[in-house]
Image: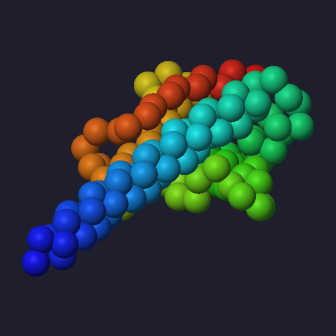
């Protein structure tokens, strides 16, 4: 009886650690996804080819379309990007700021009320 109780405790502890580890991995991937999006948008300022690609996507779309286009095909940093507002947990939202060319990038976890990680980028208009 005592042995089965100890086994149950050990299994419970291992399960809790596994869940915590998976959650940390998701959080790390989310943070990497936010930073990838920020760097990709900053690249539109520095690289003429990136700028032309960004402007092309902005003519008929939004910054999320550009981010999805420049994501690596294998092993992307994150796989859920949305425009303006989150519709589900564990997503990255890109929304326009108050100034022209300004964008906020926010990574949401389980709660859609407060982002876990955020960044802002201003793309110069020419």
- From the viewer's perspective, is 95 left or right of 78? left
Report the front residue among 3 and 74. Answer: 3
Residue 1's x, y, as percent? 10, 78
Report the front residue among 53 and 14. Answer: 14
* The quadrant where residue 117 appears: top left
Residue at screen point 76% across, 50% down: 70
Residue at screen point 77% across, 61% down: 74
Q: In this view, does 121 lie above or below 55?
A: above
* The quadrant where residue 63 appears: top right
Can residue 89 be seen here? The reply is no
- From the viewer's perspective, is 42 left or right of 80? right
* The quadrant where residue 101 appears: top right
Can residue 38 be seen here? The reply is yes
Residue at screen point 76% across, 54% down: 72
Q: In this view, does 105 lie above or below 125?
A: below
- From the viewer's perspective, is 43 left or right of 117? right
Count of all numbered marks drawn on residues in the image = 0
Residue 37's x, y, as percent? 62, 40
Q: How is the image coloured?
A: rainbow
Residue at screen point 65% across, 39% down: 36
Report the front residue among 76 and 58. Answer: 76
Residue 94's x, y, as percent? 50, 42
Q: Residue furthest left?
A: 1
Q: Quadrant of the C terminus?
A: top right
Q: Residue furthest front?
A: 2
- From the viewer's perspective, is 10 left or right of 61? left
Report the front residue among 114 and 126. Answer: 114
Residue 65's x, y, as percent? 65, 54
């Amino acid at each position: 009886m005592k042995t089965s109780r100890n086994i149950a405790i050990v299994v419970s502890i291992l399960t809790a650690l596994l869940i915590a580890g998976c959650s940390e991995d998701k959080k790390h991937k989310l943070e990497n996804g936010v930073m990838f999006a920020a760097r990709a948008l900053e690249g539109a300022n520095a690289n003429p080819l990136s700028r032309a690609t960004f402007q092309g996507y902005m003519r008929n779309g939004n910054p999320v379309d550009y981010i999805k286009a420049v994501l690596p095909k294998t092993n992307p940093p994150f796989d859920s990007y949305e425009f303006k507002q989150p519709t589900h947990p564990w997503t990255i939202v890109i929304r326009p700021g108050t100034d022209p060319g300004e964008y906020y990038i926010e990574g949401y976890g389980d709660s859609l009320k407060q982002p876990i990680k955020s960044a802002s980028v201003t793309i110069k208009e020419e």
